[in-house]
Amino acid sequence: MTDHAQPVAIPEEFLDPEGDGEEQDPDLAEDESGLEATTSALRKLWSQWMCRNGDGRFADVKVFGKGVGGVPEPAVDAYKAFERALRSAGYQPGSQWAYNCRKIAGTNSFSLHSAGIAIDIDPEQNPYSHGNPFSGKIKEHHVNAVLAIKNSQGQSVWSWGGSWSKPDRMHFQLDQGPSLVDVDWATVPGERPTKAMSPVHSPEQAPGEEEENVLTDGATGQAVVDFQNMILSWDSTALPEWGADGDYGNETIEAVKRFQQAKGLDPTGKIDGVTAALLVSSTTS
């Protein structure tokens, strides 16, 4: 546990990040019930953690093996899910940082980093600037993996600064207040399937393998049926010949490829952790 008054050594590259506008729509509802909460609403909801001056408790957690300056205790699982999602999508940051008591550039308002509810990753490779939001190290499938994370209410846990009018590619922030950052682990890419994502061994996966559950050509069983139904929920015309028959054949492969392309993923035709989480998210959002 971190002490509220304990000084935090901030890595040099995060002392004066480029921009960090934290721009969102000011007309959106300022409460915990809505998605895409405004920065001002989030600042109020997390006020007890701002600059460690309130009663909110911080926890020392590591993201990709490195400390990030502390995060609010209610957000620990959200950060764990964030790391797992990026790992599953193949992203390995070289530098990352969350807590930083400072004001938003050019304003008198405190950044969400001041409450430890925002994290910047690889600022040099993911700059704050105009243009293509995916021109940095972060690509669409990395972002989709993080945005797939939902809470128990089916709401997004994280949002991404790259979607702002002036993209802040390095910046991810929590999208809910303290009581709504619980994680539905079934939506987290990389998590072992449960219930609708129950393990099924394809011909390429020997029983007992646990590094990742992958459904692919030749797989059969209830998990295939479950995912076929999710594909049909996404596109009712996706499986016109065989439907949700529990057989992972060519029709299912092509439908999965179309879904992956629509989500900015590599169209492998296999249901891996990221694809599974996005399918679950598509049926619960």
Image (tube, rainbow, N blue to C red):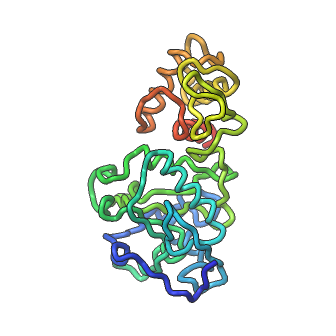
- Name above or below for residue 47 compared with residue 183: below
Image coordinates of residue 261 in percent, x first then y, are 42, 32
Total residue callouts: 0
> In the displayed structure, would residue 147 be above or below residue 29?
above
Taking 43 as reference, is 77 left or right?
A: right
Nearer to me, 254 or 122: 122
The residue positioned farthest toward the bottom in the image shown: 5
Q: Position of residue 92 (x, y in %)?
A: 42, 54
Q: Is residue 173 above or below residue 267?
A: below
The answer to whether one can see residue 47 in this image is: yes
Q: Would residue 35 be visible to someone looking at this image?
A: no
Across and down, in percent, residue 62 comes to 54, 66
Left or right: 261 with respect to 233? Answer: left
Q: Residue at image x 50%, y 70%? A: 67
- In what quadrant of the picture does the C terminus appear? top right
Residue at the extreme right: 195
Question: 154 or 169: which is nearer to us?
Answer: 169
Q: Residue at x 60, y 62 (%)?
A: 176
The answer to which image quadrant residue 93 occupies is bottom left
Residue 278 in picture, x, y percent from top left: 54, 40
Of residues 35 and 56, the one nearer the viewer is 56
Q: Residue at x 46, y 61 (%)?
A: 172
Residue plotted at (60% across, 57% down): 34
Image quadrant where one finds the N terminus: bottom right
